[in-house]
């Protein structure tokens, strides 16, 4: 500690300069992963936050904590209730190995961690809405992923870890998958860099309302990830110097230095205001927040709403208040809880306490579809839409039974204001009752309330004397809003134009084919004139008619720079100019005036094509929606309806195809498919061409290739997979040369469109594929190790001790570009595996190094060190790449299994079976079993196989069963004992797995079925449809009457209904146990039902949900379904007796095997599905 104290006690500039460590190391214990590792790091804590005896002042870093310890419920932290706190280990900074103990605190707004549980100021503050993913990783660890950084924590035990992950996932923002480009949580009053005494680098400091936030830099601020926040209600500002001031809190003094005297003045002023705001009127806010529902924004649930609409009776956050204000005071009267002190009479406060956001929302938000609801990080656009719908249109309100009957409403209001039912008054007013009504000589409601001494009613009425009543405007579809051109955009100048046409321009247009035109963009219309003197235009088009704007590559036509406009009437206009700036200006102005606000982020982009298209995706499968698209390089930015901008990386698409006679472009990426429709031929043709071009490999460097999810070029991944499956035992693999012409043509096919090249055994020769991989690396532009670092890699071989060698390789590895890293990692893993089978393929470490050294370093064998690097990388593969050895062992085991099976099955008879992972009782690694699934295997055989392997004996009344578990849907389905497993295996997505466990309800189900004479059941259940599929407006569960007969399931509105509303054939229904929690099923006894029509002409898929009131009910319904679907045979009569005979059968059944493990990539699955469908008859053989 001595040297640290020494460092601390002399915070003089010259001493600081002699410091070994840069200042930013003091701030943070995790750093940009690309920063090279430094050998020693220090954190704030390392410097001990003791006071400085010499100056009598206290500094944070190096500064200190005052003697005061924070109270248990420290007011310096956010007022949000802490959801969870506790000790966790945080991952060490890059390179270091020791985890650091951190006190971690989570509330609904922020995840923070501290040096210890006494500390008031965090080391990190992460807004929960910036968290995009939380997931368990091995060893009691879990990751918290934000847009730019991943935080790794380790809990003491599994239970604790699970709990953290659960609470984090709960507070996590529901909106994911889009890039955050600004900090959504703050509306800054002032921001900028300030020096914090003791730190050489400045901190980005932001004052927002009553808090001050510290960020390492502006980037971090934009992404939301800060160091700490300081509550200003405990702060005090002291001028200390020309440019310096102190922010004193009971726990610490922050000494800031501004860049100039003027700036300091501004900071001091803003901070004093912030303190004043925090202190002055917080008592009104505190009182109103005492009603718990008032402590969350009525519209978006952001915590601590400091504003209120005094006539609508809701408390709202600052961002929502802005939207309220834009509705105008005749709809919403917005006041601050903290600043508009006068308006807050005792009566008004009481009104807010009695109504409160919760009760007010019972009226205002009685029918909010979940898809339209706001969250604390919704965009302004979403807020505007929602708040307009909610209060201007009254779209979600609970209609009063008297709605529409003016006189009855007025009467009811007059009567009700004499009671104390404020909610009823609110409901009457906003369903149309007239606050000022006078019936004959009767008193107005205002007078009545006053006479009766109902002061709270009077207060509510008074604020609504002139309120506009919400009404749904007629017509006015939201889409039309998109096309309103901002009138402010005007632009004019000369452009050269060709005649408009109705077909794509494929040929080069010479200068002579263009004519000079005076062009004017004004009032949302683009017109072109003969000359700038002409009074009437030759023609033009309205901005709302423009569906696409495309910028051509330079010199495509006679004029150097050209762009195309596509109209919805299928005309194409070509304009050009030699001056690039002129063209840019036009492109910008035109884009600005036809792109709607929801897609305005496109304007910042250097796009080649932008416009609107119809699309369908998993959320909207039925009817196409309008989306805005913007193509920039290989990124396709999309703004789909009501969603923030998303980016599709075209290089990483899993599939790109054109279907249905060039009318639908299908883009498949992980987890979703997007169908872009050709509403109009002309612009769609342009789009599909451009997208296909952008999705192809565009060059010879690694980063320009088509990539997999994990950033490995598709070509590399496909070759490696192929060799792994078919070539591990091939003698001299990678050393033998293939046939040159075949290698060249295969390589060319990969270059054209790697995604469409599927390697199949029998179609491609092993050595050809091996050579394609080698040639790909040899011809690579810039090489796998990159030109500018390859020499460093080569030099590393000279180091003599392994430890420093490994660490040098690690350092070089971490400096590689992302794609190079992923590729190197995959390749070395592959080579490591190849040499593990050297006894079969003769390619030991040395042989592989000789082959791959010159290939990867592109040295043509001149530098022996190239081979040595490869040898080192393979030899030290586990330490250099921090490989999980268990995982590696599993990988090798799988390979051994494949090799064994291949050996056994030569020559292969017809048939088909595949390898699948099945879990026993629980999905965890230790319960994993790899099982060969022959085409004929039934569920009960699979169960026996697993129990056999684990030597589990089956007792009487043990109903072991194989379940198909769908994690995403949170459902499970016990497979029927005779059900074939293979088709199920093929239908399993990544979110499903097979699990063998006891079926605890089976006994009860069998007893129930035995008691029944006929298989049928009827009764009430609660029913809900998958909203997006059927387009119903309510997403709630409704009571319905059901009759299940041996042929069909019928749904009736009520018991007495004569006619069924719906009817489904039972054989087309798949019934799963469970309903995903997100749908808020009213009971925990739910069924998820999938209907798939079997009519070939009308394929249809519906998913809906049934909820029972009791577990018994659920069992009975499920048992009836089972019994009907399987003709009364729900459980094998002989129990598990078939066991003994099984092993014999299984041997005889070893049919032809594609031997492709299903946990492989997509191509494996395709191949195995292909094999499966090719020989469907095999299913019926041997049975
Ligand atoms: Zn809000």
Image: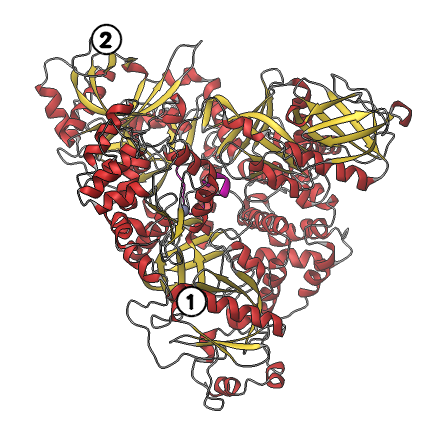
* Relative height, residue 480 to residue 239 (above, below): above
Residue extending farthest to the bottom is 54
Which mark is drawn over residue 276? 1
Q: Label 2, secondary structure: give it.
A: loop
* Relative height, residue 1143 to residue 786 (above, below): above
Which of discs 1 and 2 lies nearer the camera? The answer is 1
Q: Position of residue 770 (x, y in %)?
A: 65, 39
Residue extending farthest to the front is 441
**Most prominent secondary structure in the magenta stretch?**
loop
Q: Would you call the spot at circle 2 few (<14 residues within 10 Å), some (14-19), or many (20 or more)?
A: few
Residue 1111 in view here = yes
Q: Is residue 377 magenta?
A: yes
How is the model colour-coded? secondary structure
Q: Is residue 942 magenta?
A: no
Asked if disc 1 is less than 8 Å from ligand 1, the answer is no
Which of these two is toward me, 90 or 232? 232
* Relative height, residue 155 to residue 650 (above, below): below
Residue 83 in view here = no
Instruction: Please state if 310 lies on the left or on the right of 1164 as rendered.
Output: left
Which of these two is toward me, 344 or 68? 344
Q: Label 1, secondary structure: give it.
A: helix
The answer to which of marks 1 and 2 sits earlier in the sequence is: 1
Asked if disc 2 is less than 8 Å from ligand 1, the answer is no
Which of these two is toward me, 147 or 1160? 147
Q: Would you call the spot at circle 1 few (<14 residues within 10 Å), some (14-19), or many (20 or more)?
A: some
Which mark is drawn over residue 1059? 2
Q: Position of residue 827 (x, y in %)?
A: 60, 48
Q: CA distance from mark 1 to mark 2?
A: 68 Å
Over which residues does the magenta segment extend? 373-383
Q: Position of residue 1011 (x, y in %)?
A: 8, 20
Instruction: Please state if 617 lies on the left or on the right of 854 as rendered.
Output: left
Q: Position of residue 951 (x, y in %)?
A: 24, 41
């Amino acid at each position: 500690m001595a040297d640290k104290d020494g460092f601390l006690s002399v915070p003089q500039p010259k001493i600081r300069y002699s410091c070994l460590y840069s200042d930013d190391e003091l701030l943070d214990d995790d750093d940009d992963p690309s920063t090279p590792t430094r050998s020693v790091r220090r954190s704030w804590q390392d410097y001990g936050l003791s006071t400085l005896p010499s100056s009598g002042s206290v500094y944070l870093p190096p500064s200190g904590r005052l003697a005061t310890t924070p109270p248990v419920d420290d007011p310096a932290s956010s007022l949000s209730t802490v959801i969870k706190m506790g000790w966790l280990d945080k991952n060490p900074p890059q390179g270091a190995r020791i985890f650091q103990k951190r006190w971690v605190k989570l509330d609904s707004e922020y995840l923070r961690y501290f040096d210890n549980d006494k500390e008031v100021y965090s080391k990190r503050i992460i807004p929960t809405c910036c968290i995009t993913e939380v997931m368990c990783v091995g060893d009691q660890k879990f990751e918290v992923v934000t847009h730019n950084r991943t935080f790794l924590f380790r809990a003491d035990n599994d239970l604790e870890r699970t709990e953290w992950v659960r609470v984090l996932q709960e507070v996590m923002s529901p909106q994911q998958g889009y890039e955050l480009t600004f900090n959504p949580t703050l509306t800054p009053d002032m921001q900028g860099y300030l020096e914090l005494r003791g730190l050489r680098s400045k901190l980005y400091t932001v004052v927002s309302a009553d808090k001050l936030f510290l960020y390492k830099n502006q980037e971090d601020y934009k992404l939301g990830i800060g160091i700490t926040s300081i509550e200003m209600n405990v702060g005090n500002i002291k001028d200390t110097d020309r440019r310096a001031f102190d922010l004193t809190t009971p726990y610490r003094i922050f000494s800031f230095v501004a860049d100039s005297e003027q700036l300091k003045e501004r900071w001091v002023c803003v901070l004093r205001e912030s303190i004043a705001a925090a202190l002055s009127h917080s008592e009104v806010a505190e009182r109103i927040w005492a009603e718990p529902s008032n402590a969350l924004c009525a519209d978006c649930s952001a915590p601590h709403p400091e504003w209120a609409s005094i006539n609508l009776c809701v408390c709202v956050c600052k961002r929502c208040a802005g939207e309220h204000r834009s509705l105008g005071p005749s709809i919403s009267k917005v006041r601050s809880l903290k600043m508009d002190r006068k308006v807050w009479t005792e009566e008004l406060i009481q009104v807010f306490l009695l109504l409160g956001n919760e009760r007010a929302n019972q009226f205002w938000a009685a029918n909010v579809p979940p898809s339209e609801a706001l969250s604390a990080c919704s965009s302004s656009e979403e807020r505007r839409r929602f708040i307009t719908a909610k209060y201007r249109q009254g779209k979600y309100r609970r209609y009063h039974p008297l709605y529409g009957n003016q006189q009855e409403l007025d009467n009811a209001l007059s009567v009700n204001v004499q009671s104390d039912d404020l909610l009823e008054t609110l409901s009457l007013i906003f369903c149309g009752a007239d606050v000022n009504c006078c019936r004959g000589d009767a008193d107005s409601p205002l007078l009545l309330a006053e006479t009766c001494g109902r002061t709270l009613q009077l207060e509510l009425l008074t604020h609504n004397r002139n309120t506009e009543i919400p009404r749904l405007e007629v017509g006015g579809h939201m889409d039309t809003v998109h096309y309103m051109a901002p009138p402010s955009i005007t632009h004019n100048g000369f452009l050269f134009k060709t005649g408009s046409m109705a077909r794509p321009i494929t040929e080069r247009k010479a200068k002579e084919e263009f004519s000079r035109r005076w062009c004017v963009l004004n009032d949302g219309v683009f017109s072109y004139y003969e000359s700038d003197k002409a009074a009437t235009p030759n023609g033009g088009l309205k901005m709302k008619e423009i569906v696409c704007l495309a910028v051509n590559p330079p010199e495509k036509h006679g004029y150097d720079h050209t762009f195309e406009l596509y109209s919805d009437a299928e005309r194409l206009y070509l304009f050009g100019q030699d001056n690039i700036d002129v063209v840019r200006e036009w492109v910008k102005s035109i884009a600005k005036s036809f792109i709607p606000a929801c897609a305005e982020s496109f304007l910042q982009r250097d796009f080649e094509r932008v416009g609107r298209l119809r699309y369908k995706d998993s959320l909207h499968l039925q009817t196409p929606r309008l989306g805005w698209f913007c193509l920039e390089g290989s990124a396709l930015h999309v703004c789909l309806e009501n969603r923030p901008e998303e980016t599709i990386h075209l290089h990483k698409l899993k599939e790109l195809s054109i279907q249905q006679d060039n009318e639908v472009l299908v883009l498949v990426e992980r987890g979703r498919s997007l169908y872009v429709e050709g509403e109009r031929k002309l612009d769609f043709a342009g789009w599909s061409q451009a997208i296909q071009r952008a999705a192809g490999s565009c060059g010879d460097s690694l980063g320009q290739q088509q990539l997999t999810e994990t950033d490995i070029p598709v070509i590399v991944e496909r070759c490696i997979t192929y060799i792994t499956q078919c070539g591990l035992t091939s003698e001299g693999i990678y050393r033998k040369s293939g046939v040159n012409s075949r290698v060249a043509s295969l390589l060319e096919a990969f270059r054209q469109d790697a995604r469409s090249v599927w390697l199949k055994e029998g179609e491609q020769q092993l050595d050809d594929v091996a050579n394609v991989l080698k040639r790909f690396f040899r011809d690579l532009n810039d090489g796998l190790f990159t030109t500018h670092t390859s020499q460093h890699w080569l030099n590393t071989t000279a180091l003599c001790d392994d430890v420093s060698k490994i660490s040098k390789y690690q350092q070089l590895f971490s400096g590689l570009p992302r794609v190079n890293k992923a590729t190197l990692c995959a390749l070395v893993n592959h080579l490591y595996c190849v040499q593990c089978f050297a006894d079969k393929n003769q390619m030991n470490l040395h042989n592989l190094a000789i082959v791959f050294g010159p290939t990867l370093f592109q040295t043509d064998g001149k530098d022996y060190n190239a081979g040595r690097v490869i040898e080192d990388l393979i030899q030290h593969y586990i330490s250099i790449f921090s490989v999980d050895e268990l995982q590696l062992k599993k990988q090798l085991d799988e390979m051994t299994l494949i090799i064994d099976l291949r050996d056994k099955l030569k020559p292969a008879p017809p048939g088909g079976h595949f390898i699948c992972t099945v879990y026993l009782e629980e999905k965890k690694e230790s319960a994993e079993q790899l099982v060969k699934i022959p085409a004929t295997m039934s569920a009960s055989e699979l169960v026996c196989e697993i129990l056999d392997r684990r030597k589990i004996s089956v007792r009487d009344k043990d109903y072991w069963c194989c379940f198909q578990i769908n994690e995403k849907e949170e459902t499970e389905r016990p497979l029927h004992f005779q059900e074939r497993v293979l088709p199920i295996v093929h239908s399993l997505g990544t979110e499903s797995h097979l699990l063998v466990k006891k079926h605890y309800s089976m006994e009860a189900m069998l007893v129930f079925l035995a008691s029944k004479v006929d298989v049928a059941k009827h009764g009430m259940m609660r029913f809900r449809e998958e909203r997006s599929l059927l387009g119903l407006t309510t997403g709630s569960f409704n009571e319905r009457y059901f009759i299940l007969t041996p042929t069909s399931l019928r749904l009736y509105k009520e018991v007495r209904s004569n006619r069924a509303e719906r009817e489904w054939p039972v054989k087309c229904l798949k019934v799963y146990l469970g309903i995903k929690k997100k749908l808020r099923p009213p009971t925990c006894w739910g069924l998820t039902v999938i209907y798939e029509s079997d009519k070939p002409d009308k394929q249809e898929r519906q998913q809906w949900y049934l909820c029972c009131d009791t577990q018994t009910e659920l069992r009975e319904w499920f048992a009836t379904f089972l019994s009907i679907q399987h003709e009364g045979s729900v459980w094998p009569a002989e129990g598990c007796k078939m066991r003994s005979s099984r092993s014999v059968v299984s041997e005889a059944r070893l049919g032809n095997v594609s031997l492709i493990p299903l946990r492989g990539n997509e191509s494996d699955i395709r191949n195995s599905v292909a094999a499966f469908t090719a020989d469907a008859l095999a299913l019926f053989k041997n049975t």
